[in-house]
Image (cartoon, rainbow, N blue to C red):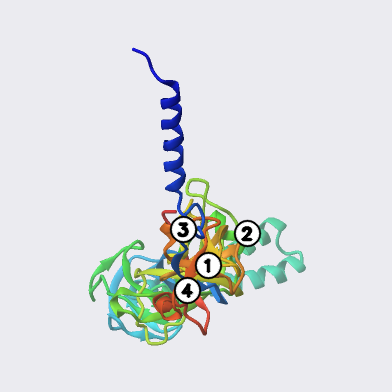
Amino acid sequence: MTVDCRSVAGLGILLLGGLAGCTPSGPAQSGGMPAMQVVVVEAGQRPVAETLSLVGTLLANESVELKAETDGVIEEILFEEGQAVEAGALLVRLDESKLAATLAEAEANFQLSQANHERAQQLFRDQLISQQEFDQAAAVFSFNQATLQLRRRQLADTRIYAPFEGVVGSRTVSPGQVISKNTTLTWLMDLDPLKVEMSVPERFLARLRVGQTVEFPIAAYGDRSFAGEVYFISPYVEQTTRTAVVRARIPNPEHELKPGMLATLDITLQVRDQAVVISEAGLAQVRDQNRAVVYVVNEELTVEERNVLLGVRMPGEVEVRTGLRAGERVIVEGIQKVGPGSKVNLAPPESSAPYRLRSGDAVTGERRGEGE
């Protein structure tokens, strides 16, 4: 079969002409796409308080387990459970009769040895007794003097006093009960102020200072918040957990808080007065915990891609540490339809109302101390 080359060439010309006739005419935007409408919100600037969230346990300011220093029989209990007592208050008295008798014996022996010692001194000066006889009298005197002091202390140990002002716990003994030196009588706790102890990961220690404020709620009191101040930061880090013990004092004048309660604390690490904050909806891509991409609309209504370093997160908002300036327009709606270099149209201002940033006092962002 013979093919007419002139016919094929003519067909090719017709095809090329047809394709050329399909090319759209008029202005084109960014790869042939029309300008998209987007919603933007200006990056705000205001104080942001960065906090560290930790779990802590409430402790008594002072706490002691009261025990007698001698065996005996409980003669009298002079406190009520839960009673507030002053420092030095008599709490428990043991039977003193046996120890009083031994004290009287010790006093008699001491008086006799003291008289003998004084006579021996005079006789030794007059050279009427030997050095050995004088030394024996002096030794008996010293022994009886020490015995007397011991018996007085043992008698004093039959009375148990409050070592500091506080609240007495439950009692574990009753009058007439025979006890030993290891028997727990009760507990005494100083409840104002309380201490709260927490374990802080080592990466946050450089930003902690004595005097920093801590705030926390207690489940028993609903949304009510309590506050205190850091007073102790451990001088060493536990090698197994890589954490350090931090303690804060919490005023507790009404004794509402109890030792052993669990507290979720917020420690203020830093307050940045001029932090840049954007709506969380403006994050086009989140690359990791601290880095993301946002789209900014410049004066020519062209989209620019910005790599930003994120700071703390707040409800619906996020701090931008680097990569963005306050006042720049960040796309919060229409992100999926545009890219770097795209031409856009701005939606009416009322469209951005749901994304408007809060203003006024410092807002608080959080960094978790556990489970990061």
Q: CA distance from mark 4 to mark 2?
A: 25 Å
- Type of residue at label 1? Glu
Q: Is residue 150 visible?
A: no
Q: CA distance from mark 1 to mark 2?
A: 86 Å
- Camera-nearest label, 1 or 3: 3
Which circle's residue, 1 or 2, is located before the other in the chain? 2
Which circle's residue, 4 or 2, is located before the other in the chain? 2
Q: Which residue is mark 3?
A: 338
- Camera-nearest label, 4 or 2: 4
Question: What percent of the width, then of the height, locates residue 132?
Answer: 68, 56
- Type of residue at label 2? Gln
Question: What percent of the width, then of the height, locates residue 310?
Answer: 53, 61
Q: Which residue is mark 2?
A: 136
Which circle's residue, 3 or 2, is located before the other in the chain? 2
Which circle's residue, 1 or 4, is located before the other in the chain? 4
Q: Which residue is mark 1?
A: 319
Does residue 196 lie above or below 4 as drawn? below
Which circle's residue, 1 or 3, is located before the other in the chain? 1
Q: CA distance from mark 1 to mark 3?
A: 23 Å
- Camera-nearest label, 3 or 4: 3
